[in-house]
């Protein structure tokens, strides 16, 4: 497996209804702190939420905002296209359910699973199953709902079977060199993660009310001991979108800021002071300076 020619690398999307343990599982698979950040964020339209690399493979985990949104809105007639878009470029889908707890919300997600990509089912929280004899019939029932490539029982909390899960995913990743160098770790990486965290909250809280071109620029990032002071601007295309991002009495912006701050504190392992504001910049993507300030070029 250490033979470089057998190396595999690819993108994995984690999907599942709320509360099944997706975030906890991601942390168990990539380690508590995301330490590798790409210097080439434009290679994926997805937000990279974690990378795990060993001698045999590189697992790049991405989020799927379109998928999640669509899942909440399953009757939308553009469903299929949105799901396809959300999974564009993803090599493997990891579908997470809770052991012995499969309900109609899980079934809704199953309806959206792609047929043209391997889908691995992770049955999480097996540490909560007292009577292991119940697990097998549960797995059999799930196996009948969809042609899963693999089914792996796992506990994100205890770490049990997480290596098996990585191994199962690995066998479906394309052969090829690592997509991201370990050497890509730079001082900018926390800036980048900070911007991506805010951007994710904007999409999570506002959904398709704001266009995909909405982005986040970190204007100042100061470290003072273990406190990070982060000043970030949310860049929108049109003045009319400002009210949407800010919300009534500023409540949306407040929620975005507070969720982003909590995530960053976990991510960076220290206190974060976050200041957010909204800016309109038409045509920012074509503006070379703007692209530079995002850290997309050197
Ligand atoms: N016992 C047990 N609890 C777990 C395990 N994995 C996650 N949990 C708990 O389940 C709850 C939900 O976990 P999250 O990781 O936030 O779930 P999620 O799927 O990311 O949730 P959303 O962000 O709402 O979609 C938390 O209280 C976790 O501590 C596990 O393997 N065993």
Image (cartoon, rainbow, N blue to C red):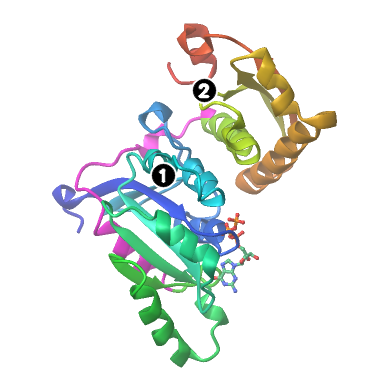
Give the quarter of the figure containing the C terminus: top left
Does the magenta-highlighted stretch encompass residue 28? no
Disc 1 and disc 2: Cα gap in Å? 18 Å
Q: Ligand 1 is in which quadrant of the figure?
A: bottom right
> From this viewpoint, which residue is outermost toward the right?
249
Residue 238 lies, with reference to residue 272, above or below; the image says: above
Residue 17 in percent (x, y) is at 54, 59
Give the quarter of the figure containing the N terminus: bottom left
Q: Is residue 36 visible?
A: yes
Q: Magenta residues, as a range?
A: 161-188
Residue at coordinates 49% horizontally, 7% vertically from top-left? Answer: 287
Front position in the image: 36 or 143: 143
Residue 6 in percent (x, y) is at 16, 52
Whether disc 2's CB lies below 8 Å from ligand 1 is answered no
Does the magenta-highlighted stretch encompass residue 173? yes
Front position in the image: 62 or 282: 282
Residue at coordinates 47% horizontally, 65% vertically from top-left? Answer: 107
Residue at coordinates 29% horizontally, 66% vertically from top-left? Answer: 147
Q: Which residue is mark 2?
A: 213
Label 2: which secondary element: loop
Q: Which residue is mark 1?
A: 83
Ranked by sequence position, the earlier of labels 1 and 2 is 1
Q: Quadrant of residue 128?
A: bottom right
Residue at coordinates 74% horizontally, 42% vertically from top-left? Answer: 271
Residue 292 lies, with reference to residue 125, above or below; the image says: above
Q: Is residue 249 left or right of residue 183?
A: right
Q: Quadrant of residue 183?
A: top left
């Amino acid at each position: 497996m250490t033979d470089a020619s057998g190396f595999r690398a690819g993108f994995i999307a984690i999907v599942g209804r709320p509360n099944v343990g997706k975030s906890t599982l991601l942390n168990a698979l990539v380690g508590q702190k995301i330490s590798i950040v790409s210097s080439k964020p434009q290679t994926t339209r997805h937000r990279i939420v974690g990378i795990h690399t060993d001698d045999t493979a590189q697992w790049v985990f991405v989020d799927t905002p379109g998928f999640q949104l669509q899942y909440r809105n399953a009757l939308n007639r553009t469903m299929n296209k949105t799901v396809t878009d959300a999974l564009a470029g993803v090599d493997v889908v990891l579908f997470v359910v809770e052991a012995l707890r499969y309900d109609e919300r899980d079934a809704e997600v199953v309806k959206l699973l792609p047929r043209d990509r391997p889908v691995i089912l992770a049955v999480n929280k097996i540490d909560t199953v007292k009577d292991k004899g119940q697990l097998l019939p549960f797995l059999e029932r799930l196996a009948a709902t969809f042609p899963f490539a693999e089914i792996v029982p796992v506990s994100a909390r205890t770490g049990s079977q997480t290596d098996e899960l990585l191994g199962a995913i690995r066998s479906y990743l394309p052969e090829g060199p690592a997509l991201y160098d370990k050497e890509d770790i730079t001082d900018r990486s926390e800036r980048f993660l900070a911007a991506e965290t805010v951007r994710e909250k904007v999409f999570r809280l506002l959904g398709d009310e704001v266009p995909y071109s909405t982005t986040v620029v970190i204007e100042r990032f100061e470290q003072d001991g273990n406190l990070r002071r982060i000043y970030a601007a949310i860049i929108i295309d049109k003045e009319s979108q400002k009210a949407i991002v800010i919300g009534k009495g500023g409540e949306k912006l407040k929620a975005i800021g507070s969720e982003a701050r909590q995530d960053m504190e976990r991510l960076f392992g220290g206190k974060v002071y976050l200041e957010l504001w909204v800016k309109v910049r038409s045509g920012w993507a074509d503006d070379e300076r703007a692209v530079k300030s995002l850290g997309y070029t050197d």
